[in-house]
Image: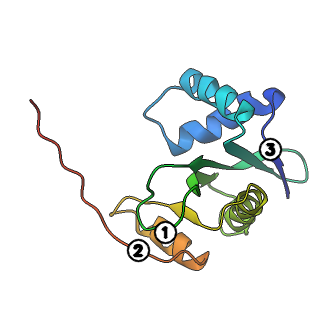
């Protein structure tokens, strides 16, 4: 497996993985956001490929300078999302992607990596715990229409 930063040439391939993770936007919106992220010094977008070159995993992280729930420092690297295509899971791809995000975070001077997961996403909770993340708090968001 090979892990590399997403380039302008690989955005189309990665957009489908990002869409699979976050299907609330269409692939065109994902492509546009990936173009911005690929050029940002405050973000990293990674793709994992098989030896044959097939993109099978995706991770995205950013630098957050505002308060990050559960973290003690600022700025904080934040794992925005991570996804491995079905059929390629449980082979260490997500671990390798997370490790690459950690290397990037250290290289840009961060001492903490934050992340989040929906309360009902037990798979994500197990992943984070297995990767050494410490659960710090749980939050329920509310809103009131005005």
Q: Are marks 2 and 3 in contact (CB under 8 Å)?
A: no
Q: Identify the mark at residue 5; answer none if there is no mark.
A: 3
Residue located farthest toward the left when viewing the structure as drawn: 146
Q: Is residue 5 left or right of residue 135?
A: right
Residue denoted by label 2: 136
> Pointer 2: residues within 10 angstroms few (<14), some, or many (20+)?
few
Residue at image x 55%, y 36%? 19
Looking at the picture, the colour scheme in use is: rainbow
Q: Position of residue 113 (x, y in %)?
A: 59, 64
Q: Is residue 96 left or right of residue 112?
A: right
Which of the two marks, 2 or 1, is nearer to us in this view? 1
Query: Relative to residue 79, is residue 113 depicted above or below?
Result: below
Q: Position of residue 67 (x, y in %)?
A: 43, 55
Q: Are marks 3 and 1 in contact (CB under 8 Å)?
A: no
Spatial CA span between label 3 and label 1: 28 Å
> Pointer 3: residues within 10 angstroms few (<14), some, or many (20+)?
some
Observer-nearest of 63 and 11: 63
Secondary structure of the residue carrying numbered label 3: strand
Residue denoted by label 1: 72
Q: Is residue 137 left or right of residue 140?
A: right
Q: Position of residue 134 (x, y in %)?
A: 49, 77
Secondary structure of the residue carrying numbered label 2: loop
Secondary structure of the residue carrying numbered label 1: loop
Observer-nearest of 91 and 109: 109
Which of the two marks, 3 or 1, is nearer to us in this view? 1
Residue at image x 11%, y 33%? 145
Which of the two marks, 2 or 3, is nearer to us in this view? 2
Residue at image x 69%, y 26%? 35
Toward which corner of the image does residue 131 lie, by quadrant? bottom right
Residue at image x 54%, y 23%? 29
């Amino acid at each position: 497996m090979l892990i590399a930063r997403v380039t302008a040439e690989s955005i189309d391939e990665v957009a489908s993985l990002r869409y699979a993770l976050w299907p609330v936007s269409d692939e065109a919106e994902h492509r546009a956001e990936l173009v911005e992220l690929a050029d940002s010094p405050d973000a990293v977008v990674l793709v994992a490929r098989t030896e044959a070159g097939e993109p099978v995993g995706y991770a995205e992280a950013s630098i957050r300078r505002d308060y990050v729930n559960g973290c003690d420092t600022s700025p904080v690297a934040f794992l925005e999302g991570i996804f491995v295509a079905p059929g390629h899971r449980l082979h260490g791809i997500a671990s390798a992607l997370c490790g690459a995000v950690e290397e990037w975070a250290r290289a840009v001077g961060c001492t903490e990596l934050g992340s989040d997961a929906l309360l009902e996403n037990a798979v994500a909770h197990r992943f984070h715990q297995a990767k050494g993340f410490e659960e710090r708090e749980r939050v329920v968001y509310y809103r009131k229409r005005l």
